[in-house]
Image: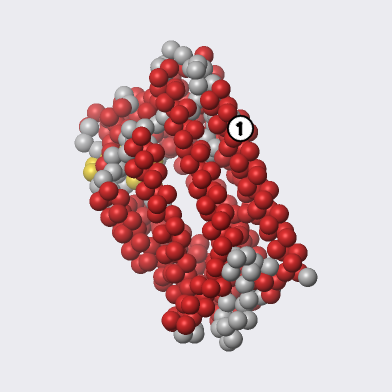
Amino acid sequence: MYSLAFSTLFVAFLIITLLLRFWLASRHIRHVLRNRGTVPAEFADKIPLAAHQKAADYTVAKTKFGLLTLAVNSVVLIGFTLLGGLQWLSQNVYQLSGPGMTYQIALLVAFAVISSLIDLPFDYYKQFVLEQRFGFNKMTRALFFADAGKGALVGAAIGLPLIWVVLSLMGQTGDLWWLYAWLVWSGFQLLMMVLYPSVIAPLFNKFTPLADQALKQRIEGLMARVGFASKGLFVMDGSKRSAHGNAYFSGFGANKRIVFFDTLLARLAPQEIEAVLAHELGHFKLKHIVKRILMLFAISLAFLALLGYLKNQLWFYTGLGLDPLLLPGQSNDAMALILFMLVLPVFTFLLAPLMSLGSRKHEFEADAFAATHTDARDLVSALVKMYEDNASTLTPDPLHSAFYDSHPPAGVRILHLNRAN
């Protein structure tokens, strides 16, 4: 009875989610195309019509591609769950590996490999067809596959020990395993914040110290004004992969570093770069980073506690097309992890607007911080250039934006900054 109810609930949420996402995407496409012919008045003297139309076409192409990806992922989800794909995989892995921890890790690895192989053609198409069509792709095919290979090796080197620890906790520490796993996961996340800038990121990109001394002095002056200490200013060879530009800071504690894409430095004036960095520093000084980390920890604790309950419920497995008793004497912990990762997005999508709302609030606050410590007009001009260079639509559908966008729409954001002048 419970399994049938859960199956029905899962299918209902999946259908609702799919219908909502397709409806939002269709609204977005229609809204962007409806406004394709005219540059919004507030940008009319800053962005050419051709660039505005390119952004519209790029947005529509990405949205349609997203719908195709969503449809395929939904079929894969049904295949793994209700159609018995995960059951079939677990039986075959069990026959090859035998029982115990080896089986559990092998099942997770097999699932990860199959998922990556399904994603690979879509990643390839996005890079070498979609991004290429609009002039953004700078990556060679050799680099694409080299990145994929390095990513798999790094993922295995980091992920396999973490998986072993989590599975060991699930099997040996009783009903509160989820609390111990959460402590391990939280510690792992903090460790990655320390290691990523200096150990992992350089495996994929080249980072060189900022050579422009005048710009460096300008940035150091900004950091002194706002009270930010950095381990260094670096330029990343983003142009090796993409024409898109950005700036960010990474790391934690004394390991913080500021990174500029070389594409960004080539496009913006020094005062505009300073204003963009002031926005990024605003996230740090206003404790947005700490708030996001704490929220991540709280959400992960709640989800692990939920998994701690679900993994012992027979209906959780049978309601998703699996028989957890098919392999006698074998723990279902790995299967529970996979099922949870598969179905969680179906049940949490309706919470997306809340996450987006919080993120946009932080973006407004960081803009206000930048306007306090630099000239707001410089940030406006920088944003306009970035909108044009990245082919970001100036006319997103408001409801689609509310669901998905972590940043405010261009017109709203510029309006807020102009009021700060």
Q: Considering the numbered disc 1 on the image, is that residue within a helix, a strand or a loop?
A: helix
| Quarter residue 19 falls in | top right
Where 332 falls versus 121 (above or below)? below
Q: On the picture, is 51 further left or further right than 306?
A: left
Inspect this view and state whether residue 372 appears: no
Inspect this view and state whether residue 93 appears: yes
User: Can you give x and y, in whole percent of width and height, for residue 318 in the image?
Assistant: 67, 72
Decide which of 315, 381 is in the foreground and name it.
Answer: 315
Q: Residue furthest right?
A: 1
Q: On the picture, is 140 further left or further right than 385?
A: left
User: Can you give x and y, in whole percent of width and height, for residue 197 in the image?
Assistant: 34, 52
- What residue did someone put label 1 on? 27
| Quarter residue 218 falls in | top left
Where 390 falls versus 53 (above or below)? below
User: Can you give x and y, in whole percent of width and height, for residue 164 in the image?
Assistant: 46, 74
User: Can you give x and y, in whole percent of width and height, for residue 97 in the image?
Assistant: 44, 82
Where 205 falls versus 191 (above or below)? above
Q: Residue at x 62, y 72 (%)?
A: 322
| Quarter residue 313 falls in | bottom right
Decide which of 255, 354 is in the foreground and name it.
Answer: 354
Q: Residue furthest bottom?
A: 329
The amino acid type of the residue labelled 1 equals Arg
Q: Quadrant of the N terminus?
A: bottom right
Q: Residue at x 68, y 57 (%)?
A: 11
Q: Residue at x 57, y 40 (%)?
A: 404
Q: Residue at x 52, y 14 (%)?
A: 41
Decide which of 165, 352 is in the foreground and name it.
Answer: 352
